[in-house]
Amino acid sequence: MQITESKRLFAHAKNFIPGGVNSPVRAFRAVGGEPIFIKRADGAFLYDEDGNSYIELINSWGPMILGHNHPMIREAVIKAMENGTSFGAPTAREVEIAELIVSMVPSVEKVRMVNSGTEATMSAIRVARGYTGRDKFIKMEGHYHGHGDSFLISAGSGAITMGNPDSPGVTVGTAKDTLLAPYNDLEAIETLVAANKGEIAALILEPVPGNMGLCLPKPGYLQGLRDICTREGIVLIFDEVMTGFRLAKGGAQELFGVTPDMTTLGKIIGGGMPVGAYGGKKEIMEFVSPAGPVYQAGTLSGNPIAMAAGLTMLNYLNTHPEVYSRLKEIGMQIAAGMASINHKLGHDFTINQLGSMYSLFFTEESVTDFESAKKSDTALFGKYFQAMLKRGVYLAPSQFESLFLSTALTDELIGKILQAHEESIKEIL
Ligand code: PLP
């Protein structure tokens, strides 16, 4: 595989952009080698600056659930652009998308649009603090909620990949209000709650975490959190930036039948444009300015082009339940296919999969939380990543990520992915 142009661009980029990239994990530091510069994407494929093509298994880290450059979304964006790119004033489309989100996501009675998942989680915590009059909140080890200061403590995703889950620049004063707990451990939450009685505003988590690799909630865990939060007056926030509109049209909360008080959303909600949102119970959301005293704003929030893309995507998902049955089928085919290849080759690596999300961990122990995820052989993952890339399959460049499948994957492409997997495992072991 020739990547001369990508190499040239990366060397040039490092002169002007820190580390040469606009988001750390893109630099491929965890897997070695140099990043591939992408020129265009279509359906199930990415095309790089050197003319190579790759089957996509990350899909822009989640948003492209129907594959890249979907004609329906492209047309909606082009049509919206004919009327101008930003107004900074209310539009009919914002009301339409808000009403649709409320109808799709069980916990959301009112919703505010923002520009990223990071903004959504930062704002949700502020609102929960304003609503309860309390300062502290609980976060799970290895979960990632964007790069807001108070979340960069034992953070997952790129933060673990880069080896700085606790970032310089986050003050001790900020960090002291973030209480950490292991995922899937209700006892630990009870202990934290007892030690900080009446002081905890919120408990935020990824209900099905993807940012330490994919982990699944133990039976009863999410309901257990719901019960504790109800009893203690703690605002339960599901960060569904990854899982929202992906695991089901109403997200993990619909799939597991547990309704939080607030939900944060991103990725799919913008159909590939920069969008996030937070919403929840009316009585909590009424605290948001200008209805209430908690300030939160955005020059480009509810941007008409972004709303056109998001609305088109959500309308489609809302009216096409077969998307979810097909994604489940694709996810199971890939996970079962990989597991049987691994077994045949004598390596029963753990694969966690739910619907269109999966992670292959280079450990044979089960992975249920941050501690067990960290037992993976990350050096071996790096070799696997490179072996798959060489065979034209584009994975997330870190062990601590979930992959995101799209409906653009055909049975033929799944066959190619599995073949690449078998050849790669044979090559690296
Ligand atoms: N929350 C979760 C669960 C995420 O996975 C991410 C990003 O991957 C974020 C929040 C932050 O979203 P953004 O990158 O759009 O700021």
Image: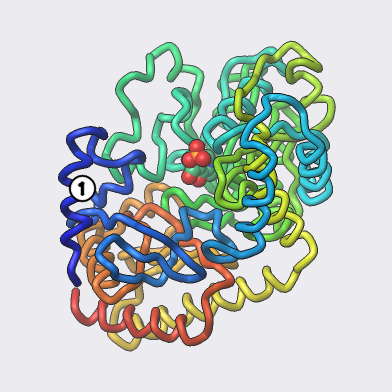
Task: Report whether 371 appears left or right of 282.
Answer: left
**Mark 1 Cα shell of 10 Å, populated few (<14), some (14-19), many (≥20):** many
* 232 or 357, nearer to the observer: 357
Q: How is the image coloured?
A: rainbow
Q: Is mark 1 within 8 Å of ligand 1?
A: no
Q: Quadrant of the C terminus?
A: bottom left
Where does the image place residue 406, in percent across and percent down from the top left?
55, 67
Q: Quadrant of residue 16?
A: top left
Name the spot of residue 277 as percent of width and height, x first.
66, 37
Residue lying at 59% horizontally and 67% vertically, measured from the top left: 355
Residue 350: name its quadrant: bottom left
User: Which residue is rendered at x = 68% and y = 46% of the image?
Assistant: 80
Above/below status of 344 relative to 43: below
Q: Is disc 1 placed on a helix, strand or loop?
A: helix
Q: Residue at x 48, y 65 (%)?
A: 358
Q: Residue type at mark 1: give it.
A: Phe
Q: Position of residue 322 (x, y in %)?
A: 72, 73
Vertical order, 30 against 3 (above or below): above
- Quadrant where the N terminus lies? bottom left
Q: Which residue is mark 1?
A: 10
The image shows residue 346 at horizontal and vertical percentages of 28, 83
Q: Is residue 222 visible?
A: yes
- Residue in the foreground of this view, choosing between 343 and 291: 291
> Which residue appears farthest toward the front when viewing the image?
82
Rendered view: 163 above or below 89: below
How many numbered marks, from 0 up?
1
Write the residue at 34% across / 57% down. 38
**In screen coordinates, is 378 left or right of 395?**
left
Asked if residue 219 can be seen in this view, the reply is: no
